[in-house]
Image (cartoon, helix red, strand yellow):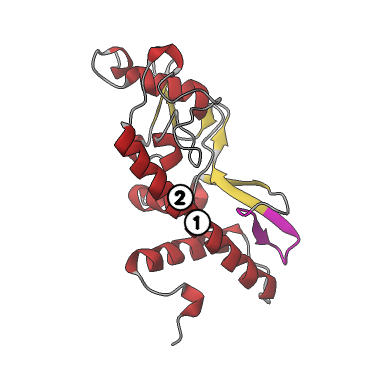
Amino acid sequence: MTADFLPGTDGPWQSSRAKTLCRRGPRYVTGADLVRIARTLALEPWHFTQTAPAAADDPTGVVLDNARRRVTLRVANAAHGCVFHIRTLQGTGRCGLGDLAPASCRMFPALPGKGATRTGGEAVEEVRGGTGPRLDEEQLAEAERQWAADRDHWFELIARWNALAEKAETPPDVEDFQRYLLEAQTSREAGTPWPEDVVA
C-alpha cells in the first residue's frame, strides 16, 4: 500500500496533480525553480531540462546561435510525462521532487499569476475527486508572491542574456545560458550586481 491510499495524507492531491499536470510536464517554471532543483540534486540543469521553440514575443524566449534560434527552457518530458513523475504500483503517480518541485506545481490546482484560479478555470476549492488544495489561503498567497518575484527576475535575466548573446563573438549555446542562470541566481540571492555588471 502506498501513501496514495493512506487516510490523512495528501495522496488524493498527489494523484489529481499527476493526472492533470505531471503527465504533460510542468508549466510556468522559472529560473529559480531550475537552480533550486539543480543545487539540491547536485546536477547541472542541462541534465533535466529541454528546449522548445519560442515565439518572438515570448518573454521567456532565450536567444541562441547568434539570434538564429529562440527557445524556452523547461523541465524535460519523457514518454510518461515529467522526468520527475513517479508511477506507483497501483498506477497512480506522484512527484519525485516532493517539496523541491517548481512553485507552480506546488500551487496546484491554482494557476500562478491567476490568483485562486484552478487549472481549467474552476474555483480552487473544487478540485477533481473532491480533494482540496494542498496549500491554505495564506500559503497560496505567499507562494503566489514568491512565484511572481521569481517570474519577474526570470524575465529580466532572459532579457539581459539575450542582449549579451546578440553581441557575443562566439555563438552561445543552451548550456552557456544555464551557466549564466546559475551565476545570476547566486548574485540575486547574495544581493550583488548582475554578473555582467561586476567591474573587476
Q: Give the image location of residue 92, x and y in percent.
A: 43, 16
Residue range in magenta is 59-70
Looking at the rendered image, the quarter that the C terminus falls into is bottom left
Q: Give the image location of residue 169, x and y in percent.
A: 68, 77
Q: Residue at x 64, y 54 (%)?
A: 61
Instruction: State whether residue 141 is above or below residue 155.
Output: above
Q: Which residue is mark 1?
A: 152
Residue type marked 1: Asp
Instruction: State whether residue 86 is above or below residue 105.
Output: above
Quarter-of-image position of residue 155: bottom right
Q: Is residue 129 left or right of residue 172?
A: left
Residue type marked 2: Ala
Q: Give the image location of residue 69, x and y in percent.
A: 72, 57
Instruction: State whether residue 113 is above or below residue 156.
Output: above
Q: Residue at x 49, y 79 (%)?
A: 197
Quarter-of-image position of residue 10: top left
Q: Residue at x 63, y 66 (%)?
A: 162
Q: Residue at x 54, y 29 (%)?
A: 81
Instruction: State whether residue 52 is above or below residue 187.
Output: above
Do the residues bearing badges 1 and 2 touch, measured as CB atoms within 8 Å?
yes
Q: Nearer the viewer, residue 1 or 18?
A: 18
Q: CA distance from mark 1 to mark 2?
A: 6 Å
